Amino acid sequence: MRRLPALTVPYAALRARAGAAKDRVAALALHNIAIRRDSTGALRGFALSLWLTCTAVGAQGQTLDVLHWWTSAGERRAVEQLVLQLDKRGIAWRDAAIPGGGGGGAMKVLNSRVLARDPPDAAQVIGRTLADWSDLGLVLPLDEVAQRNRWSQSLFPLVQRVITHRGHIVAAPLGVHRINTLFFNQRVWAQLKLGAPKTWGDVEQAAAALRRAGIAPFAWSDEPWQIATVFETLLLSEGGPALYGELAATQRWQAWQDPRVAKALERLRWLRRLNGETAIEQRWTASARQLFTGDAGMLIMGDWVDGELVAWGAQAGRDYGCAPVPDTAGMHLYSIDTLAMLVGTKRREAEQERMAEVVVSPAAQLAYNQAKGSVPVRDDIDPAQLDECARDSWQTLKRDYSPLLPSIAHRMAADEATKDALADALHRFVKDPAITPARAQERLVALIRSAARTTPSP
């Protein structure tokens, strides 16, 4: 198996490869695309997972190379659904799945392939990164596909905005994840006669009952991206949607000085201590497994956990329950999966456009999202076909008055470098009791203020 080499990119080289991109865009691309060194100065390694042609096609068919980070049981089931739908249209999906929670490894591989002039035909590129890559001319516009299939009339307005950059459709949307989700083991809850956790008081009472029963209150991981995922739900819980909206806007760094940010940091440390033992770093799938087996009672994580639990044979409402994180009911902290069709030398625009058309179709949307745990990007599906966790998420998106907030930890509101820096700062905070919430807040303010200086205003 050949490993792609780690790579750092000089500014001049990046500008040359960007071609006619303006200086500002090239500098921004360097900020987001250049592979970041860790604290020891060594490049963080990555490895390619198995490249697999999932299905064969006839003489008229075409195989498209797709790079992504969907590697868990639920995610693989979702990919299989897309493969089946595409096969009906004569398109084969050659899988380039890069393991690693949060997609950090996948983005490093993707960056290296693009800079080596060997981009995949399609890739999981989301949020702020999608806009940056579009500015560099790396993304195939999908305006004709969107017009032909009337996406503007069938997609949620939020989704339409996310995939639109400088007046062009730049990606095919796949599904909407809700981040502010609290999962709990329904069987354990019934055994201990607990009510659904709706408030932080409910959570505290449940934690005490779980400890008495010898069950860890929370499935918890100290992986930086998982800590950041929990923390952003606490920012929404403690600060409300108005403050969170300010926090998600990089240019409004002053909002991070708000006292409610310190309260969210205090809540983060409180949550971590509820188990009464030292936390470990483990994959999110391991945390989901703890919830599934009843070794832990609760888990705060995006609703991709829903898809994982279903893949293991669990059923929402019977084996597990889900609720909005306390004080975030009726709000949707979102991350949207999107497939970008990348510009390359292989000239496969027709097949790429057909892929985009298929994955947004009603049939593919239902099949993919039922397996993934997310919800369809379309507002014209029947929500009765979703489980109770997904149905609440979809209905929250559907309501005109619901606060819809972009995830900071999952690239919707922060670039790659900023989200990683925030996650590292939060990781140090929870690992070092000597760091007070006030000191941690000062560090977060400094990080966002620095990002504001280097990020152009929208």
Image (cartoon, rainbow, N blue to C red):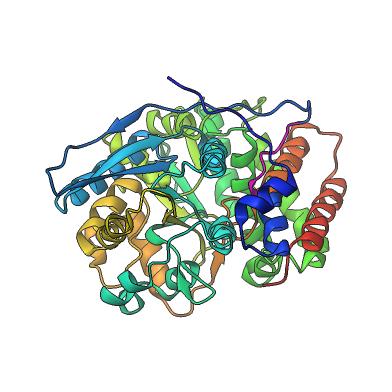
Q: Which residue: 56% across, 51% down?
A: 410
Residue 145 pos. (x, y %): 31, 69
> Does any portion of residue 440 appear in the rendered image?
yes
Closest to the observer, 371 or 146: 146
Toward the left, the furthest residue is 58
Residue 446 drawn above or below residue 168: above
Direction from residue 119 to residue 35 in the image, left or right:
right
Rendering coords of residue 271 (x, y %): 65, 41
Residue 1: % across, % down: 42, 19
Q: Is residue 365 above or below residue 303?
A: below
Q: Residue at x 83, y 62 (%)?
A: 257
Foreground residue, 30 or 235?
A: 30
Quadrant location of the C terminus in the rendered image:
bottom right
Residue 9 in the magenta stretch? The answer is no
Q: Is residue 56 above or below residue 32?
A: above
Up-down: is 146 above or below 113? Answer: below
Does residue 175 appear left or right of residue 255 in this picture?
Answer: left
Residue 422 is at least partly visible in this image: no
Residue 214 versus residue 185: which sits nearer the camera? Answer: 185
Instruction: Work out which residue is located at the far top of the displayed protein and give it.
Output: 1
Residue drawn where x is 26% and y is 34% of the image: 53
Query: Position of 228 compared to 293: left or right?
Result: right
How many numbered markers are drawn? Answer: 0
Span highlighted in magenta in the image: 32-38
Q: Main secondary structure of the magenta part?
A: loop
Q: Where is residue 127 drawn, in percent x and y?
A: 54, 59
Magenta segment includes 36: yes
